[in-house]
Image (cartoon, rainbow, N blue to C red):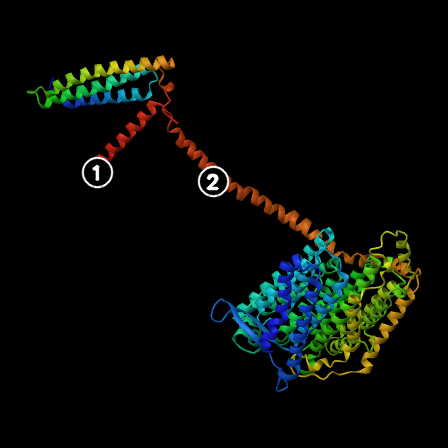
Amino acid sequence: MTDSLALVLVPGLPIFGFLFLSMIGKRYFAKQSGLIGTLLMLVSCGIACATAYKYFFVTGMVDGVYQHQYAFKYVWLPFSETVSIDMGAMMDPISMIMIVVVTFISLMVHIYSLGYMKGEERFAIYYSYLGLFTFSMLGLVLSTNIFQIYIFWELVGVSSFLLIGYYFDKPSAVAASKKAFIVTRFADAGFLIGILILSYYTGTLDFDTMIARLTMPGSELTAISTAGFLGISALTWGLVLVFMGGAGKSAMFPLHIWLPDAMEGPTPVSALIHAATMVVAGVYLVGRLFPVFALSCPAALDLVAYVGIFSSMFAAVIACTQTDIKRVLAYSTMSQIGYMMFALGVSHYGGEAGLGFTASFFHLFTHAMFKALLFLGAGAVIHYVHSNDMKDMGGLRKFMPVTHIVFLIACLAISGIPPFAGFFSKEEILTAAEHNNALIYWCAIATAALTAFYMFRLYFSIFWNKEYVGHLLHKKDNHHNDHAHDHGEAPWSMKIPLIILALLSIGAGFIPFGNFVSSDGRQLASEFHLTAALLPVSLAIVAIAAAMLLYGKENTGPGRIAGGAGGLYRGALNKFYIDEIYLFITKKIIFGFFGTIAAWFDKNIVDGFMNFLGMVSENFSDLLRRMQNGKVQTYAVYVFSGLLGIVLLMVFLWT
Amino acid sequence: MKDIGLSHFLIVSTMLFFIGVYGFLTRRNMITMLMSIELILNSCNINFIAFNKYLFPHRLDGTFFVLFSIAIAAAEAAVAIAIIINLYRARKSIDAEDADSLRL
């Protein structure tokens, strides 16, 4: 199979699934649509893994450097001979890693949804939307052209909108999907302006050409660096605006408000989109443009780093107070994406100094595994308990043994305990931070401790804490047997992905990621310092112990700490009032102030002008109408004045 | 007599003509409008006679024209009175403002 056919099939199968299931499958294959979607995804995943294997081990490396190869490139919309929007598929280390991650996690979600979404009325539509999303995400990571990535970026946003708002009869879900779409669309406005700035100065939309022109000394680089606006060079503006788009999609502060609300969607959707794939699109974008960031514009890279670490800490603090388990996981995602962002932010380009780049994508890889596992496990718990809130749970380890074990594995992985996957990727990130920026390093250490704390707070609150009596309450109504809790923990379709992902969460850390992904394409030996790992691991263990003391058995400890922390606790519980600030800005300032002025202008000046035109026509026609009044004397006046006119004309012509 | 030239007669007839036009255009009473029309016609008659007397004294063409004009003016006045009487029978008014049905 040639690369071009493979990379057409990999996104092509899911989009075929979307079209087929939404148009035909909905009517005729409703019950089998899950299997159809899963099968298509299985084939797509197989082809993706085979292509990636071939790239990494057979054809990709030339002279020790991984090449950017093009599977296909098609000129779609030529603006001129040099500027065109191409549709193409690029093979390079990060895109190959991403297609493996995206197709694999999507496959796990497809299998899981067979059990989770069973009995849904709109089952076929759900699988068609999943196919649409997978297609969009794959197109995004395979893009060769910055405009192509923008097109797929918007498509991913639309798919997310459709999936979050899947339960469209719930007003909260509808509001959440609208919020997600509007916030990311707002960020994409910045992204578009950034694209236009960058492409104007480089004269191209193609990634490789643009990166070459912006990193090698030449006329384009000097032009873009000297042109400025408000004292900041055009290159910085372009990269910062492009990062704004990435920050919106990756839920970085202050464009993070949509992510917790997006948990209104079905849990497998949260696992796919809001944990493993869509939210890393921003990280991918920065990674794709990394040479420009690192070589030509370190200021923008610093911004990336600080936004990343701030979002990371911000989310970690909030996650310590939330009681909805999916919200805790959402903030945890935001925090981990912050890790990936600042890992990119502290990295340099080339060789040892480019460790941050490798670490970021390594963390992306392992995070996809254990975060998807966490969400799918939370889905199993929610499926069993019929509630999202921690207070309805507790003591579930007796009733859900498989889920308990895999959830524990995932929590250990995310806390960075060896030998689980998260330990290795976090260690690399912390090493990269330590070598480059001390402030970020210490903040990251603190965040790692907080991460361990809130994740184990979650774990203990669900599986320990108190005794579970929910099933006893429900046993009272005997006629509710269709969905009674004696159905056991979860069907096998839900357990298999959990087990597979748990195995990967254990084993993925041992992959020598530096051999595959690095900032300049050369292989990077992964270094491992035992002494450096001591501090974060010991802090994590202390945090886990604290969580065990506070949440292992029901006690008044948490309540007393919350009371003692007072304002900080209340602030964190209310997500630091960021949503209220946004509502204030939109309602009072934009609608109230600018909106009323615009409305006044529209009603009085624009409409007034139209009314004026109408009035003029009306009066003029009235005037004309009066000419014909039926009175003979008036008509005689017209005759005489006409005659007078002709006489004067004659006199004038004769002299 | 030799102090009164052609231009005096022409000025008088022009003045009479425009007085007649003014009367025709502004009077409300239809009979008065008729009177104004007669003024106009008579001013033209004066014009003819004056030109005849001063430019062609040995001919009578102008005088004959005036005789015809007077006769036709009388006939026209009779027809106009007949129209006015019919209009009065229909509308009970000889006000020119009231005869305005020739319109949309």
> Which residue is labeled 1 in the image?
A653
Q: Quadrant of residue A556?
A: bottom right
Task: Look at the image and tell me whether residue A310 can be seen.
Answer: no
In the displayed structure image, the side of residue A651 where residue A425 appears, left or right: right
- x, y percentage for residue A355? 71, 79
Q: Which residue in the rendered view is the most extreme toward the front?
A: A28
> Which residue carries the number 2 mark?
A613
Residue A212, quarter of picture: bottom right
Indicate the amino acid at tag 1. Answer: Leu
State whether residue A646 is above or below residue A183.
above
Q: Earlier in the sequence, mark 1 or mark 2?
A: 2
Q: Quadrant of the C terminus of chain A?
A: top left
What is the spatial separation of the Cα atoms under label 1 and label 2, in whole angstroms?
40 Å
Amino acid type of the residue tagged 2 in the rendering: Leu
Residue A573 in picture, x, y percent from top left? 81, 58
Labels in figure, total: 2
